[in-house]
């Protein structure tokens, strides 16, 4: 049971380049989400999904795309990277319940855009 | 518009003493509150939570208090240990009818417990 895995751990991009951050979970969780962590800002929700084929925007969705073709995977795409997207990105997953908000986080991807 | 605020960026306490971390929120629709702990180069890990129908929840050395009228919650750690040194995030969610469990996080408070 690997939990939530993210690849890569580190990435450096030039402005305008595209890339996909990978996220996978093996806990059969319906809910998956992407956050970015910036100094003094906490974690901000980018996109989330409540099941395969269903995605929605969070607080800061601009510049990012997501898709959810399987329960296990939830990749985050940057189509044209900008320096403002330099951040640490965390993927999280949880069961979709009415009472528990506990989410399991991956180890993070540190992205630098130059 | 920060719906969840942790106004103290850092806190330093002596080992064995109590650590009190505070969190304020503005959205009265929040009905579930959580605390996460984060070590450097790792993802956040769930620590403790509380439903809005309660005012206190305990788990070992960790207790969370909720004051709905003041829209304030706090995390008490007693006794504090050096291994508790980490960044602590407060988070809130509003399930309502959507049941999505989206979490809104505060900015985090860095706790240092000195031996």
Image (cartoon, grey):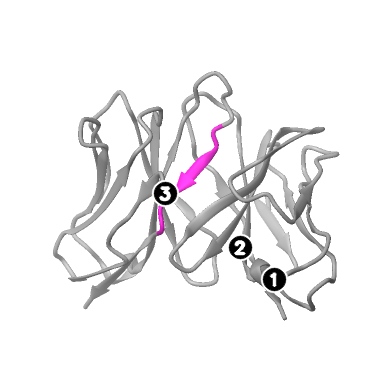
Q: Residues within 10 Å of mark 1 (few under 14, many from 20)?
A: some
Residue A31 in which image quadrant: top right
- B29, above or below B11, in the image: above
Residue B59 in which image quadrant: top left
Quarter that holds the C terminus of chain A: bottom right
- Residue closer to the observer: A99 or B28: B28
Residue range highlighted in magenta: B101-107
Q: Which mark is residue B1?
A: none
Q: Position of residue A1 (x, y in %)?
A: 68, 50
The chain containing the residue under callout 2 comes to: A
Outermost residue toward the left in this view:
B17
Residue located at (21% from left, 30% from top): B69
Q: Which residue is mark 2?
A: A107
Q: Which mark is residue B2?
A: 3
In front of the other: label 2 or label 3? 3
Q: Which residue is mark 1?
A: A9
CA distance for labels 2 and 3: 25 Å
Left or right, residue B85 beside residue B102: left
Q: Residues within 10 Å of mark 2 (few under 14, many from 20)?
A: many
Q: Is residue B102 magenta?
A: yes
Q: Secondary structure at mark 1?
A: loop
Q: Position of residue B5 (x, y in %)?
A: 35, 51
Q: Are discs 3 and 1 less than 8 Å apart at CB?
A: no
CA distance for labels 1 and 2: 8 Å
Judge whether residue B63 can be spotted in this image.
Answer: no
- B2, above or below B84, in the image: above
Mark 1 on the same chain as mark 2: yes
Mark 3 on the same chain as mark 1: no
- Residue closer to the observer: A100 or A26: A100
Q: Secondary structure at mark 3?
A: loop
């Amino acid at each position: 049971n690997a939990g939530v895995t993210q690849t890569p751990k580190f990435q450096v991009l030039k402005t305008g380049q595209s890339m996909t951050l990978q996220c996978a979970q093996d806990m059969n969780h319906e809910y998956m989400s992407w956050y970015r962590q910036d100094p003094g800002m906490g974690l901000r929700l980018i996109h989330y999904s409540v099941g395969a084929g269903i995605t929605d925007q969070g607080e800061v969705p601009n510049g990012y795309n997501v898709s959810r073709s399987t329960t296990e995977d939830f990749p985050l795409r940057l189509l044209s990277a900008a320096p403002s997207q330099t951040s640490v990105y965390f993927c999280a997953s949880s069961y979709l319940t009415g009472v528990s908000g506990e989410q399991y986080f991956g180890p993070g991807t540190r992205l630098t855009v130059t | 518009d920060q719906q969840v605020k942790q106004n103290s960026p850092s806190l330093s306490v002596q080992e064995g003493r109590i650590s009190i971390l505070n969190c304020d929120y503005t959205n009265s629709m929040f009905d579930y509150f959580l605390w996460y702990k984060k070590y450097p180069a790792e993802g956040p890990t769930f620590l403790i939570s509380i439903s809005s129908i309660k005012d206190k929840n305990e788990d070992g050395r960790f207790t969370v208090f909720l004051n709905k009228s003041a829209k304030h919650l706090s995390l008490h750690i007693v006794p504090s240990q050096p291994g508790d040194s980490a960044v602590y995030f407060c988070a809130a969610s509003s399930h309502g009818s959507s049941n999505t469990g989206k979490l809104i996080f505060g900015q985090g408070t860095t706790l240092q417990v000195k031996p």
